[in-house]
Amino acid sequence: MSQAAADATVGPATHCPYCALQCGMYVSDGEITPREDIPANAGGLCQKGWTAAELLTSPERLTTPLLHGSPVSWDDALDHVAGRIEAVRAAHGPDAVAVFGGGGLTNEKAYQLGKFARVALRTSQIDYNGRFCMSSAAAAVNRSFGMDRGLPFPITDIARADAVLFAGGNVAETMPPFVRHLTAMRSAGGRLVVVDPRRTPTAKMADLHLQVTPGTDLALALGLLHIAIADGHADLGYLAARTTGFEAVRTSVSAWWPERVERVTGVPVARMREAVRILGEAERAMVLTGRGAEQHAKGTDTVTAFVNLALTLGLPGREGSGYGCVTGQGNGQGGREHGQKADQLPGYRRIDDPAARAHVAAVWGVDPAALPGPGRSAYELLDALGTPDGPRALLLFGSNPMVSAPRAGHVARRLAALDLLVVSDFVLSETAAVADVVLPTTQWAEEYGTMTNLEGRVLLRRRAVTPPRGARTDLEILRGLAERLGCGEKFPADPRVVFDELRRASAGGVADYSGITYERIAAETGVFWPCPETAGEPHPGTPRPFLDRFATPDGRARLVPVDHRPPAEDVDEEFPLYLTTGRVLAHYQSGAQTRRIRPLAEASPEVFVELHPDLAERLGVASGDRVLVRSRRGAAEAVARVDTSIRPDTLFMPFHWEGVNRLTNAALDPSSRMPEFKVCAAALQRCEDGERREDGERVA
Ligand code: SF4
């Protein structure tokens, strides 16, 4: 069926609003039908996708701007915001106004937000919540491959592999249609190895589960590499032809002999050897990482260690093999390419590169010298709000840091210290609820735009329903503010016009979109970047960018020596347990959307903490008990869930509810500035009557 015929019969073809798999779907009269033509899901959807339309007509939908909680007209709201911005800038300078974006925003919005910050506000203070998601993997592969594209191969390549090692990803819950690619691989005789402190649904389907102590994935990767070299699995021909740095890495991992790694990680030597044998003997093999390995204060080095393993085995840049990072947020890939990062200009260009500044400034029609330099990373930006040297006003789009930021109790106090907090959202999220101004925006199925999925495939999000009266797109909101700040003509609100400008701004950059058009995306069910514009035959796009050379100056991948170190906060007498966080099947990120969808809220109604039966017995806790989990930063109440799938020294909590991130540690990776969400020291006790805490903050 042609696209036009399909649209006419089952409704406009679009994509799910949630995760980076970006499952294709049709939306018509509130009904969702999965698309068969998008390889990532090929007719499948998860529970979140099937129910996504419910929020379009939710009674909790915002349709009127709010000023200090009271409905006002759009003109009054935008006049107020622009006036306050002008006043803050006049008093404190341009960096006193900050912008915070999101990894779920379309490419057009992410691009426009970066331009709005640099051109309309002239502020360097912009970053986004993707810093909490993808930044460690991005920093690592930029260093090793010279380019950050989550999967540098089509997702369907996974089914052709003979072995996959997946460190820190639980796709069976976070993106269930992904599982079909792993299942196809295993049905054809392939083997799956999963690294995770929990026996997750993904670990349960694996041939081998390496149940690491939280915070020790890096030591495990070093140990696997040590064994791979010792057992003769290093592909010396590939290493000589396509890489640099192997000798230094070989020397560095010699100190990580298997028994030492077993002591650090808790993974038996025999299991490590079996994992290496599975990978080393496979004709085609893949190493994948997810947030479990990446969200650490050493996440960049952890990913680097897994990349070193993949390179030593000769995998990246070979068809059917490779290293890939499984991106999380809906536009986690595109959102990190087009300028909403503190150090970045569109096309994945660096903001401190004079040539990049000159190119982008020419597209924007401004003087390169007028563009600000790099700003603060996401947590550092939130941490500086309302301080003497920090921003006094914050414009926030597509994010809910009251729930999703680490050390969230502290972040809540920083938000409260602002002179102006403006939130654009379609529901009253926890952060919108404390904003001075709330601007009601449109949702996924109500607007056009492009999203780039975890494969680097640029997809078209089509408008399937008419937005409610009163809601505006983020592009319209930015246009309205820019008009009031005297530069409205530079901020078109039509997504196609914005995309055409993005194409020009990205031309020649690492993430080159200049050869991609809405028409091509529709005709080809997505186009892989880089895709430069050409004078003759259109560029076909680049499904596998590293087949001939890596994106480094010499075309070779770099092996980089890294070393293990303990978590930023280790367990002790007062906080004797590791706490790790993650997601559940029914909810997405901060839960602002999915907690408002009835079937999802019923499936997973409240926050829980998972603990092992041995630990539960020691603490006198049973499933269903209300317990208090404490860390050095705060406390959160939860329902106990006793389960053998977790290590006896570890607690697990899903982060979709307010309170969980009051516990997490904001220690940052030195390269990526990723906070250490995945491990901190904690204590757990039964909640006796009278002990329940309202705000969860620890007083002492
Ligand atoms: Fe697909 Fe992810 Fe949406 Fe589920 S949440 S339907 S896996 S895009």
Image (cartoon, rainbow, N blue to C red):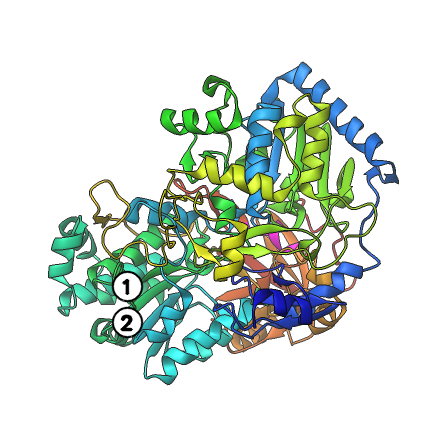
* Residue at the extreme front: 536
Magenta residues (range): 659-664
Give the percent coordinates (x, y) of residue 565: 34, 50
Q: Are marks 2 and 1 in contact (CB under 8 Å)?
A: yes
In the image, ligand 1 is in what quadrant? bottom right
Amino acid at pointer 2: Met
Q: Secondary structure at mark 2?
A: helix
Give the residue displayed 53% in from the left and 53% down from the top: 519
Residue underneath mark 2: 272
Q: Out of 48 and 682, give the one closest to the viewer.
A: 48
In this rendering, position of residue 608 left or right of residue 183: right
In this rendering, position of residue 318 left or right of residue 16: left
Give the residue displayed 41% in from the left and 51% down from the top: 529
Query: Can you see residue 700?
Result: no
Give the residue displayed 32% in from the left and 67% down from the top: 286
In this rendering, position of residue 319 left or right of residue 9: left
Q: Residues within 10 Å of mark 2 (few under 14, many from 20)?
A: many
669, above or below 600, in the image: above
Which quarter of the picture shows residue 306?
A: bottom left
In this rendering, position of residue 367 left or right of residue 593: left
Give the percent coordinates (x, y) of residue 186: 37, 81
* Residue at the extreme top: 90
Q: Out of 182 and 129, give the one closest to the viewer.
A: 182
**Placement of the C terminus among the 4 image quadrants:** top right
Q: CA distance from mark 2 to mark 1?
A: 9 Å
Residue underneath mark 1: 261
Give the percent coordinates (x, y) of residue 195: 39, 68
Ligand 1 has an atom within 8 Å of the beta carbon of the residue at disc 1: no
